[in-house]
Image (cartoon, grey):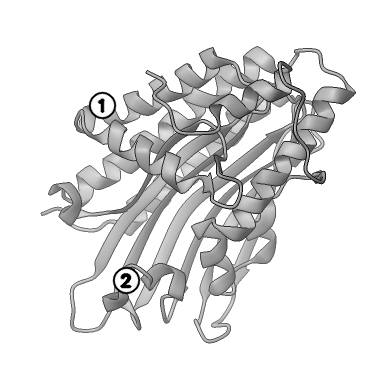
């Protein structure tokens, strides 16, 4: 049984954040600004302390708004969002480390993307710590290119393959089910991977192997996303495409505020609001009872907003 190594997780996450920002900056031509933040003392009932590094690119040549956030926080008590499925952990102190990112491109033909990798430890004096990894990535196109979706899922599968042939189908399915807007009866996009509560009990993997899987998912995000950005960022578009992009971004906002576990966890723990809500799109529109005209590029997207096999 390998030992928990929080320092190794932290080093990996900081390096992952730096590499993703570097590669996306190369596509955009502008750099992410860096905002270091820290909680000097315990705050609120959760006793939240810690800090992080938020990196943001706004009004870029390619990225209209992108945020890549690293955080490492500690709290006296796990919030309700973290114990809903594991009530035996209520009352434990915790540490949470993670990188979470959302990229909203300017060009409507470039999909929005999201990724997150994280590690939790719940601790109680006199008892062994309970730890788990989680994360994944998903793609939200406005004008779907099937080749891009296939590439995205091929990278998802390659991230999982070294760990067993059953891993990709399971976490692809979980992603389809998680990123689902119940009130709209549609998926947020074309999916990818989602996993949570990954520890020794899941597959019998020790800490090192669970950590290795989280790293594989984290590393494959940029190999999946960058070629899509590079291939679409210079494609011409007009007002019609821009209007549809802003309308569909509304679905993104709805999911993040109503269903996203990370957003709910951050708000319930009294986390840093600017970092929690950095995932929100810069511009969004809502239209009453809008339906695209049949046969249009816009209507085609709706054919894909339900789970399907891409590979």
- For mark 2, what is the residue? 122
Residue sitting at x 62%, y 29%: 302
> How many residues crowd mark 2 within 10 Å: few (<14), some (14–19), many (20+)?
many
Q: What residue is drawn where x is 67% and y is 57%?
A: 277
Q: Residue 259: percent from the left, percent from the top? A: 55, 57
Q: Quadrant of the N terminus?
A: bottom left
Disc assigned to residue 145:
none
**Left or right of 202: which side holds 274?**
right
Looking at this view, is 241 or 39 the one in front? 241
Does residue 12 appear to the left or right of 47 in the view shown? left
Question: Are the two marked residues, 2 and 1, in contact with CB atoms closer than 8 angstroms?
Answer: no
Is residue 191 shown left or right of residue 216? right
Single out the residue that lies furthest toward the right.
Answer: 239
Q: Quadrant of residue 308?
A: top left
Secondary structure beneath disc 1? helix
Residue 161 circle label: 1
Does residue 143 appear anywhere in the picture? no
- Residue nearer the viewer, 245 or 44: 245
Q: Residue at x 22, y 28 (%)?
A: 162
Q: How many marks?
A: 2
Disc 1 residue crowd, few under 14, some 14–19, many 20+, Cα 10 Å: some
Label 2 sits on a secondary structure element that is strand
Which of the 4 image quadrants contains residue 52?
bottom right
Viewer-side label of 2, 1: 1
The image shows residue 286 at horizontal and vertical percentages of: 80, 46
- The disc, 2 or 1, on the residue closer to the chain's N-terminal end is 2
| In this rendering, position of residue 131 left or right of residue 107 | left
Marks 2 and 1, how far apart at CA: 29 Å
Q: Nearer the viewer, residue 272 or 242?
A: 242
Q: Is residue 17 visible?
A: yes
Quadrant of the drawing holding the C terminus: top left
């Amino acid at each position: 049984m390998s030992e928990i190594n929080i320092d190794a997780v932290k080093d990996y996450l900081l390096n992952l954040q730096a590499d993703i920002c570097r590669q996306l900056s190369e596509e955009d031509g502008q750099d992410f600004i860096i905002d270091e933040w820290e909680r000097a003392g315990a705050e609120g009932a959760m006793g939240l302390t810690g800090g992080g590094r938020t990196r943001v690119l706004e009004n870029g040549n390619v990225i209209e708004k992108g945020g890549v956030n690293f955080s490492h926080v500690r709290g006296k008590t796990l919030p309700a969002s973290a114990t809903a499925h594991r009530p035996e952990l209520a009352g434990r102190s915790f540490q949470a480390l993670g990188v979470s990112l959302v990229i909203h491109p300017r060009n409507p033909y470039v999909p929005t993307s999201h990724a997150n990798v994280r590690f939790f430890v719940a601790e109680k004096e006199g008892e062994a710590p309970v730890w788990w990894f989680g994360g994944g990535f998903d793609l939200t196109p406005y004008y779907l290119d099937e080749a891009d979706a296939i590439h995205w899922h091929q990278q998802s599968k390659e991230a999982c393959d070294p760990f067993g042939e059953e891993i990709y189908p399971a976490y692809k399915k979980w992603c389809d089910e998680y990123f689902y807007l119940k009130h709209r009866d549609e998926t947020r996009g074309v999916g990818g991977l989602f996993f949570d509560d990954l520890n020794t009990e899941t597959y019998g993997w020790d800490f090192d192997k669970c950590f290795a899987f989280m790293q594989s998912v984290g590393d494959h995000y940029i190999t999946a996303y960058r070629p899509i950005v590079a291939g679409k960022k210079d494609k011409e578009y007009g007002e019609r495409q821009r209007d549809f992009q802003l309308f569909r971004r509304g679905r993104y906002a709805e999911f993040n505020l109503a269903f996203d576990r990370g957003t709910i966890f951050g708000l319930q723990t009294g986390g840093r609001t600017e970092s929690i809500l950095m995932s929100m799109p810069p511009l969004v529109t809502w239209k009453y009872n809008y339906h695209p005209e049949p046969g249009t590029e816009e209507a085609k997207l709706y054919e894909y907003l339900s789970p399907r096999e891409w590979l």
